[in-house]
Amino acid sequence: MFKLSTTSIAVMAAMTIIPAQAHEKGSGEIERISVTGTKSVISSHGSAMKMETSQLDTAGTVAVYDSSLMEAQKAQTLGDVLKNDASVSAGNTRRNRERFYMRGFVLEPDQSYLRDGQFHLSRYSQPIELYERIEVLKGTGALLYGKSTPAGLINLVTKKADKDEFKFSIQHEFGSFGHSKSTLDVAGALNESGTIRARSILSKSHKDGWREYKDGSKAESERFVGALMLEGDISDDTTITFNYDKTDDDGKLDMGALHLKNKKTGEHELIGKRGYIWDMPWAKRKSDVENIGFTVNSNLSDDWSFNTGVNKQIHERRTLESMYGKVQGVDLEKKQYSLRGRDTFEKFAVLTGYFDLKGEFDTGGINHRMVIGTNFIDYSRTGKQMSMKIKNKVSWDAPAIINRPDELDYRNGKDMAKLARKSYGVYVQDQIELNDQWHVIAGVRLDREETDTSTQNNILPKLGVIYHPTDNTSIYTTYSESFEPKDPIMNSDDVNYGKSLDAERGESFEIGAKGEFLDGALYLSTALFNIEQNNKVITDKTGKHPETTQAGSVRHRGIEFSAEGQLTNDLSLLTSMMYIDAKIIKDPRFEGNLSRDVPKFSASTWLSYSLTDDTKLSAGAVYVGERYGDPANEFLKDGYVKVDLGLSHTVNLGSDHAAIVRFTVDNLFDADYLKGGCTNNANFGDGRAFKASLEYKF
């Protein structure tokens, strides 16, 4: 296992700064903030598409949110970025990390995330400081990446060293609920020719949170992020990059509010005040993540190139819970509940690698752009866990807490079952330009996943057709398949305990239209989709013992619309809307119900107006419609509107130096709303928060 201390990372940052300053290259210009990073051309470097292609030549929907937008909105988490996309809704955040739904399907942390186009285990709160853009690939990415949800993938694109100029930025933020954050970002060449480059990022943040435990303390969190990126040109045609980053995240737990059925009224009720945390103050999670890897990019000729890379991720986390699962022993009359303690230590180790050969050629006047590649994932999880009942009842009206029992320690528990998976895939994709108007995308993937108990082989096809009525518009349709391998049934009480499960299969059909208007300044897109997932794993709990089978199926149908770009020289727009009908088709208990935490209608918009060349005012709103918080459709969450504001001003200090002051207000009207949650709990949205930051850069 690789380990570097915080001091070591700071030293690396200093070593990067010193030689870089000797070769400073100023541009003489201060970069203005733009609202959205979606461009006509999606770059292949680090992109989920694996090739350079325009939005109009993509048989699907790809939304891109860049660092300019993240800075303008002062995004602190991945959720702060994804709120701009109506197709993504919030899931559970109770254990100090975020989960999401896309088009109504859960984005699983071990199969729905990429980093620079490679599989990435996202079982922690993502360090937004490291990313220059977030790509939301809608529709299955199984052809290029293997197992995935049928709804899509999130690709996190890391910041890179700059070949042309030295960059230095130091920034401090402060705000409501004890928020503070300091970030240092240095990038530039390490030699006169610029063939060796580096970038270092250091960030330290703290937050008290706005909700309180019973004793009046807050759900505090601390996070450190450190990264070093090195890049070198071996020749004019070949570049090798090295990356290392470390994220230490230490935060307390907050399960949100409990919702349950009142036996007297028969109605589902939300129990607990908006600012009240059910967990005990000693409940917390400590997460340490390290990534180390390299990539090689080489142009073999004017038409052919290859990319290859390897990444190793080690993630250790300890989760100390005062309650797990749902809240136990609730007495509504006495206003009491019981505690269950659990201490879990887990270690995840993931090795990933890929090789892509990309080229362009003609056959009989027909142009082909082809990707031939292979990738692998070696994943393992080990751990130890101890759980116990905790004596005495807790009253949610009294300030008294119950202390953590001394014996509640994972070292007193049992080893968790080891999970080990190896995945291999070979794929080919060809984008065929029959003529200027008609393009076809066809591909197939052969995939194999091995565990200690089973081996699964899958063949995944993809077919897309694009028609260009004009040079600035396109209409497309695409069909693709996905699969999600499932572990054997591990619950010893289950009727089918130990039984192996097949991969859940998904089919996706989508038709859409896109266009670039106002001389390319405004991009519009719309998509109509139908996604079905069969042989879904479900558990019937109506009998004496639970029975897990693969008799379930769901169907999600919907329509999306997005608009982004410059309406005038001073006014820019980013808008996203989605209507979806997400239904459970087969399930012994929930057949015909709507999927959990999926609003039928959602929308977001962000407007930015340049008051002067140096001052920009922004305003945004997010609407999330009503949706059910449980698969039984008994707990209905109200719809809500959340309004945010932003203001930035740049002061030119001369000689390429500038100071940027930013102010934001999140949840301007202090809307009281519920986000995601588990089957029996719901997470409260944050209250109104003010943030300010001062950045010095050159």
Image (cartoon, rainbow, N blue to C red):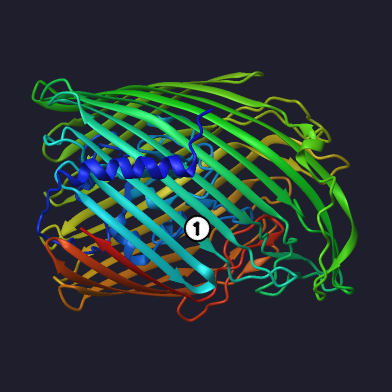
437 or 640, nearer to the observer: 640
Q: Is residue 381 above or below residue 577?
A: above
113 or 439, nearer to the observer: 113
Task: Measuring from the top left, give residue 605's x and y in whole percent.
Answer: 35, 68
332 or 9, nearer to the observer: 9
Q: Along the horizontal axis of the image, is 365 left or right of 621?
A: left
Q: Quadrant of the N terminus?
A: top right
Q: Is residue 140 visible?
A: no
Instruction: For mark 1, give the secondary structure.
Output: strand
Specify the farthest residue to the bottom. Answer: 669
Task: Measuring from the top left, give residue 271's x and y in whole percent.
Answer: 74, 70
Residue at position x 72%, y 49% in the image: 320
**Residue kind at label 1, given as amino acid type:** Ser
Residue at position x 15%, y 25% in the image: 237
Q: Along the horizontal axis of the image, is 100 left or right of 135?
A: right
Task: Measuring from the top left, give residue 661's x and y in whole percent.
Answer: 30, 71
Task: Measuring from the top left, give residue 314's x and y in whole percent.
Answer: 53, 33
Q: Along the horizontal axis of the image, is 183 left or right of 213?
A: left
313 or 626, nearer to the observer: 313
Dot 1 corresponds to which residue? 89
Q: Is residue 234 visible?
A: yes
Q: Quadrant of the C terminus?
A: bottom left
Residue at position x 49%, y 33% in the image: 313
Q: Is residue 631 above or below residue 376?
A: below
Local crowd size for mark 1, using a 10 Å CA cut-off: few (<14), some (14–19), many (≥20)? many
Residue at position x 13%, y 24% in the image: 303
